[in-house]
Amino acid sequence: MNIFDKAPVVDKDAFVAPGASVIGDVLVGRGSSIWYGCVLRGDVNSISVGSGTNIQDNSLVHVAKSNLSGKVLPTIIGDNVTVGHSAVLHGCTVEDEAFVGMGATLLDGVVVEKHAMVAAGALVRQNTRIPTGEFDVKQVWGGNPAKFLRKLTDEEIAFIAQSATNYSNLAQVHAAENAKPFDEIEFEKVLRKKFAKKDEEYDSMLGVVRELPPELILPKNVLPDKEPKAK
């Protein structure tokens, strides 16, 4: 939606879910995804979302025209960032490949540096900087108010990068589903009913083999095969 003379600019390869609101001076980059129920309101300042970033369901992103410190603050979200469900970002900066957990709140002037993580439910107070850390030590902050908890593990660092990739792939599936015409949706309903999984013994008695048609099979990038962990 436009607001005055400000109109959103959304890359053709980005996904904005039905029911999400992108309003005013908002830029959404290539391969990013804005999920169901989100609100990005760029009315009194601008919002910028980089490439490959996901802002998950029911999150709120707004900006600051004025506050107690007198600063005018846009909201800047970098590349390959994950913002968890129901997070609130207000007049803050989240740098590339950072992670904001579900239900976290980032207030005016907050800076989350590259690769840092804000834990679920954390409240990050105004003008707090969450650093990558000395010697590139990647940090987790959490609590109310948020404070340094510990260093990120190697597994968590890998998860942050993988999370952005997973959501980029998943967004393509949702975009394709939402683009289907009515007739195709109705046809798939019939297929699901016909190929619904039955009791194997029942099918065996009837001599029935039920193989899902390709229309009903999720892509492998959505539900990847789990590889056994090395012992």
Image (cartoon, grey):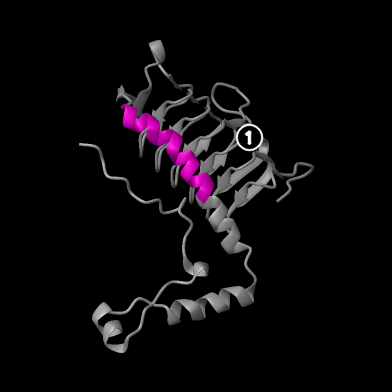
| Residue sitting farthest toward the front | 207
- Give the image quarter of residue 206: bottom left
Q: Is residue 159 magenta?
A: yes
Compared with 228, 147 (above or below) is above
**Secondary structure found at label 1:** strand
The image position of residue 53, as x and y in percent, is: 54, 39
The image position of residue 168, as x and y in percent, is: 53, 45
Q: Is residue 170 magenta?
A: no
Q: Quick check: 134 left or right of 79?
A: left
Instruction: Determine which residue is flagged by label 1.
Output: 48
Query: Badge 1, how many Cα within 10 Å: few under 14, some, many 20+?
Result: some
Residue drawn at x 48%, y 51% is: 57
The image position of residue 142, as x and y in percent, is: 33, 30
**What secondary structure characterizes most of the magenta part?**
helix
| Residue sitting farthest toward the bottom | 206
Q: Amino acid at mark 1?
A: Ser
Looking at the picture, tell me which residue is in the foreground, 218 or 131.
218
Q: Which residues are magenta?
A: 153-169
Q: Quick check: 21 left or right of 84?
A: right
Residue drawn at x 59%, y 44% is: 40
Residue drawn at x 33%, y 49% is: 226
